[in-house]
Amino acid sequence: MAEKSTFASVVRNRGFLNLWFNQFLVQLSFNSLNFALIIWVFKLTDSNTAVSFLIFAIYLPAVILGLFSGVLVDITDRRKIIMMIDFFLCLLFFSLIFLKGSFPAILGVTFLINALAQFYAPAEASAIPIVVKKNQLLAANSLFSATLYSCFLLGFGLAGPLINHVGINFVFGLGGVFLAIAFLFSLMFPSIKSTPDAQGKELIWALVHKKYSRMWRIGVFEIKETIGLIRGKLLVLSSIVILAGVQMGIGIMAVLAPGFLEKSLQIKATDASYVLVIPLGLGIVIGGVVLGKFGSSLIKRRLVSRAILFAGLLLLLVGVAPLISPAVHYFGNPRPVPFLYQLPLSKVLIVGSFLMGVALVSILIPSQTVLQENTPEEDRGKVFSVLGVAMSGLSLIPIFLTGILADIFGTTPIFIALGLVIIVVGMFGLKPSLFFKKEDLSYKVREFLGLGHWEGK
């Protein structure tokens, strides 16, 4: 009789337990570092443009390596990949203790760390089906997903207080220690290999014989094949665009957050952990639970459109808040203070961040579900690779421009403009007939958007 699949039975699997513990240490270190660097770079340079360069360095590796990392991982022993990444990440984290005063050096290290992350994520995810039994796969993936979101919440939530109380070096050093432990655990991993497909075998041959032109042709073939899977499928394409738009919005808000807190609201940027990150994470978790329970009966297109409209309204409210709140003008010499000294504005941010978390999860889950439902299982990895590249690639220029515009006009107008743009997108999803006449769109597009908008149903 087959063993019943439970969380306990999965955790008793030594290979999975080592992999899971490694994921926890790496993701916690990685998320703490990203938040810490955003805050540190703003304090070092007092420039939103500098923060946009940092976010650029975080996203760029996904654009360059995203389409190839999965293929390369599939033809390599995952144990060696994870072990090497843990080791080099550990060195890079410790290097920041000595390089933190140089902005160019920070950008270089950030790029390398995120380049390594492009190989860690697919190596980790693709190793799960190899180290656990088939009937344990759902429980194993659930544990990994829960750990991923928990590490995001813990990493971003703890980084601010740690910087405040023990300094930025402690964040770098603690992350380095965690990664050193992860490396030691990876030495105990079994070999985690899978049999490569025809494309993988051809890539192995090209790598061994250093046939770079053949490697390029393989990459181009994979890209064309994946684009062919997407072409003409409005549901798949719209889901990719929506998810990429969410990534772009998150990147823009990451650029704006330190300057908006310190200059517009006069709240310490390190207190973003309390007023932004933790409420946002709680909103995502609670919203996800509620959506999982009641969301199956809702029409996905309407749910996503309403969530986009609501997110735009929230951003508009946050942008307007410092203009209408007398609390911002309380201090004779404007300076950032702990969030407890700005309670009226802090309450607006906390409630707004929680509701934004609910809105984000109401956009992400239905869009990801539509993407999964409308792509063949054997091609799903390729489509999600394109999604990762699109999410990062479409964000690069807006993120770069956001920092420059914020330094020229301030962060408040950018928040207001972003909110208005997102409101228009949400309104289009809910009522496209306000923007286009029936004869302006093909039947296929009108059917996708809902024929009732033009038929009076």
Image (spheres, rainbow, N blue to C red):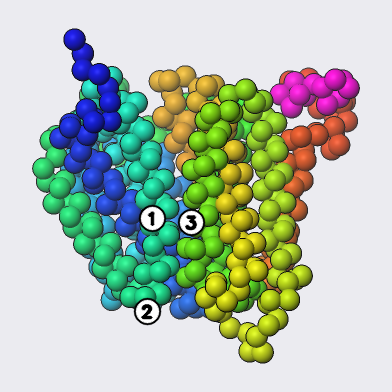
| Residue pictured at 70% horizontal, 31% vertical | 302
N-terminal of the pair, mark 2 or mark 3, is: 2
For this view, does 329 lie left or right of residue 119? right
| Residue pictured at 60% horizontal, 38% vertical | 363
| Residue pictured at 31% horizontal, 73% vertical | 169
- Cα–Cα span, label 1 and label 2: 26 Å
Q: Is residue 277 magenta?
A: no
The mark found on residue 278 in the picture is: 3
Magenta region, main secondary structure? helix
For this view, does 384 lie left or right of residue 401? left
Tell whether label 3 touches label 2 (CB within 8 Å): no
207, 38: nearer the viewer: 38
Position of the N terminus, as image quadrant, is top left
Tell whether label 1 touches label 3 (CB within 8 Å): no
In the displayed orientation, state which residue is furthest to the bottom: 332
N-terminal of the pair, mark 3 or mark 1, is: 1
Q: Quadrant of residue 204?
A: top left
- Cα–Cα span, label 3 and label 1: 8 Å
Q: Amino acid at mark 2?
A: Gly
Q: Secondary structure at mark 3?
A: helix
For this view, does 331 lie left or right of residue 271? right
> Which is more foreground, mark 1 or mark 2?
1
Which residue is denoted by mark 1 in the rendering? Answer: 154
Q: Amino acid at mark 3?
A: Ile
Please state the horizontal and vertical placement of residue 436, each as a whole percent of the image: 85, 34
Q: Is residue 127 above or below residue 408?
A: above
In the image, the segment drawn in magenta is 445-457
Q: Is residue 276 above or below residue 264?
A: above
